[in-house]
Image (cartoon, rainbow, N blue to C red):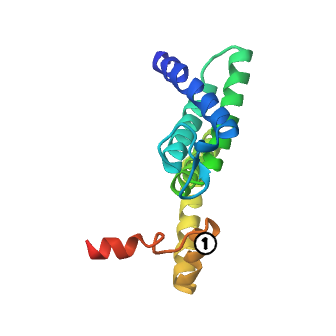
Amino acid sequence: SEIIKYFKAILYPYLVLSLISVLLIPGAKDPDFNTWRALAETKNHLGQMGLISIILCFIALNEKESRNAKLFTWVMLLVSLILLLGSTSTTSILALLAFLMLSSLLFFDQIFKPLGIGSSFSIIIISGFLIIFFGIIYADAEMLNAIPNAFGKDMTFTGRMDLWNYM
């Protein structure tokens, strides 16, 4: 809990300054992608910082803090989410979705644990996702292209596959 306090002291001002820079400074946008990069070097670095701060905010919300401190943490969580989405970093957004899915799975596991079915519920949910995933692959592998296409990407990772093959 002491280390969380130090991380918040460093990260929260960074988040506020990043949001201000995106709103007021034209150079805070990535010239290659026309996306936010704020104080970070690239849009992906901003996405990573947003993701890290979202996870930190979730940890901080579980600590015993005053009402004002919790409210401020919620505001920083919102700022982090805005920066993450503004960066349009696909990897960070997908990592956030995976984090939220795992967190919700653990949340429901805790709810069903007193009933004696917490682990069983988790196993059923994970098995269901795996069955759906492999069913999609078996039925039509091209459906997997829908996920990258939703982010404006393709399955070649924007031409990187050619570079990897060349290397």
72 and 47: which is toward the camera:
47
135 and 117: which is toward the camera:
135
Above or below 70: residue 149: below
How packed mark 1 is, by other alpha carbons closer than 10 Å (few <14, some 14-19, many 20 or more), is few
Residue drawn at 53 percent across, 51 percent down: 92
Above or below 90: residue 1: above
Residue 4: x, y in percent? 50, 22
Q: Quadrant of the C terminus?
A: bottom left
Q: Residue farthest to the left?
A: 167
Residue 17: x, y in percent? 61, 29
Q: Secondary structure at mark 1?
A: helix
Residue 156: x, y in percent? 45, 74
Can residue 43 be seen in this snapshot? Answer: yes
Above or below 34: residue 47: above
- Where residue 144 sits, quadrant-wise, is bottom right
Residue drawn at 68 percent across, 42 percent down: 82
Residue 27: x, y in percent? 59, 43
125 and 50: which is toward the camera:
50
Q: How many marks?
A: 1
For label 1, the residue is 149
